[in-house]
Image (cartoon, rainbow, N blue to C red):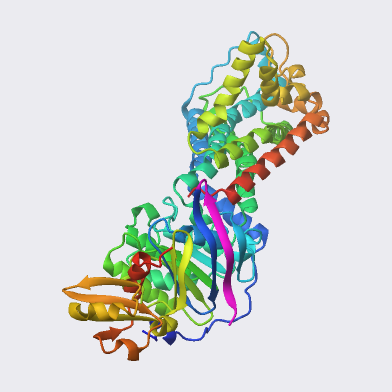
Amino acid sequence: MSTTLADGAPESPRSEAAPAGKSPGDILRALVRRELWEHRALWLAPLCTAAGLALVAAIGRIHIDLDEASQLASESPRVALFSIIQFVLAAPLYLVALFVGSYYLLDCLYAERKDRSILFWKSLPVSDGLTVCSKLLVGLVVVPFGVFALALLAHLGYTAILGVRVSLGSLPPVLTWSGYEWLRTEAVMFLLTLFAVLWWAPIAGYLLLVSAWVRRAPILWATLPFVLGPVLEWVAFGTRYLLGFIDYRVNGIFGILGFGRLNLISRHGPHHAVGTALEVLDFRGALISIDLWLGLAVTAALVYAATRIRRYRDDT
Amino acid sequence: MTAVIEARGLTKNYGATRALDEVTFDVEAGRIVGLIGPNGAGKTTALKAILGLTPFSGELRVLGLDPRTERDALMREVCFIADVAVLPRWMRVSQALDFVAGVHPRFDRAVAETFLKKTDIRMASRVRELSKGMVTQLHLALVLAIDARLLVLDEPTLGLDLLYRRNFYDTLLNDYFDKQRTILLTTHQVEEVENLFTDVIFINHGRVALCASVEDLSSRYQQLTLVAEQAARARELQPFYEREVFGRVAMYFEGRSAAELGGFGELRTPSIADLFVAKMQGPGRP
């Protein structure tokens, strides 16, 4: 009893020198990669959508119903239509990404508690701050700008497919490629993605907080307050301030940018290329909008709260 | 000797329940410490406090760091397996290695791969496809490959069959443990691992009932097995616990010499399991 097996253990052969640490950048890269392993819908869903659209481009019939088809006889309206189609084809990808990205933010911190894998994640030298940041980074940068890049590549693919069809005579030559307008449309889409991310960041922060905080039914906690709140306010006071506020925090950016002034398609006048938005929309004004920056400050607070909850919560 | 863990007056309440009540103990480097107690005794709470997973009051230094405020630095030196099968179920084995290699500065991927080659675990498998025993093996492979100073194991082999359990502890002892490392382990299967321990801490109702090295136990505690007729006289030496075994009586003493007890019957050092039962059920229990 006085000696145990452990007494025969060797002296440590390993070196005493501490190995070089991992930089936060290295760790963040590993964390982001791990999110894309776990939540495969984040990239699978947009990819499948893009593949579906490519199929439509390859075999679909394009029906253009304009009062004055003769408009398309000259080059400028054909370029405008080309840029509008470039814009419209990206929309399904963004919609899908918005859906899977929101669900991801709501699920990521909840799922690791539900399956108790948080105990494994927490056994590694990764701070809660870096972990939560990696999830925010996926939701606000990797997914939106990943979709931007996917839309760009997909559009080049559709253009090639449509070009082949036109040359084969299965489509009328109603679109005209213009490198300049193509670039301008991409710039518009990049800026819109950027401002959508900045404006909707507080929603992402709120989803993360709900994900870190609730014990069950995160979807209900994420949505019900925004339904019940306005209803209760209306019943109790007959006012609609809350509804107005929610509407502003969701759609306000469109007003700030001046979407009302944008007039790409008109039935009777000439069409305008998407690139005109660069002149029409007030990106500078949006960037210096106090509400945009207030929203970002609120995002920081919400993410900080989610981090604190993950750090000190003990319900495993 | 430097203390790897210094706990002074650890206290933790869950609502009205006191999970830890002024718990004080030291764990020195190069030891294998068994934290032993019945269900709900506060073992897991103590481990969670050490790992910075739960708030508490009192003083606690782990490798010289405060787990409440310096957890991130602490986790570079500490490894833990909190429970069986907490590895994320969606993960592939290769992804688990990639991930730990990506975030842990002290992870040696080759060590993990060498260990996994000796098992039936394939790199492409997902955790959800592995048996419970294999998940534990995978987790052990990750832990073995991390050059940590303190390893904390909370019931790591619960629910595994005997072969997996035996392999787990053999690997731990042969491939991992050395004099620079410290292992803190809780388990219900005390009999199986008692030869592993250099130190034991008994904990019950949130209090430390015993904290001693295994060498100290053999000089402090005696188990006397004697025939029933001798029992009355032996009882005058005040055993703290006794039980009947096949018509004979086993008595447990603290601080008696062989000269005092030898005449009554067969004298030996109690096993950790026996001592645990005696301490938990004897009159001196908290």
* Drawn side of residue B189 relative to residue A206, left or right: left
Residue located 72% across and 33% down the image: A195
Q: Could you say where residue B1 lies in the image, as x and y percent from the top left? A: 58, 83
Residue located 39% across and 69% down the image: B116
Work out whether A279 lies above or below B74: above
Does the magenta run of residues contain B4? yes
> Looking at this view, is A240 or B277 the one in front?
B277
- Residue A78 appearing in the image: no
Q: Main secondary structure of the magenta part?
A: strand
Q: Which image quarter holds the C terminus of chain B? A: bottom left
> Looking at this view, is A83 or A252 the one in front?
A252
* Drawn side of residue A2 relative to residue A274, left or right: left
Residue A223 placement: quadrant: top right
Q: Quick one: which residue is furthest to the left in this view?
A: B247
Work out whether A260 lies above or below A184: above
Q: Could you say where residue B179 lies in the image, as x and y percent from the top left? A: 51, 82
> Looking at this view, is A84 or A24 the one in front?
A24
Work out whether A277 lies above or below B8: above
Q: Could you say where residue A283 lies in the image, as x and y percent from the top left? A: 79, 30
Q: What stretch is highlighted in magenta?
A: B1-16
Q: Could you say where residue B269 lies in the image, as x and y percent from the top left? A: 33, 82
- Residue A104 appearing in the image: yes
Residue located 24% across and 85% down the image: B265
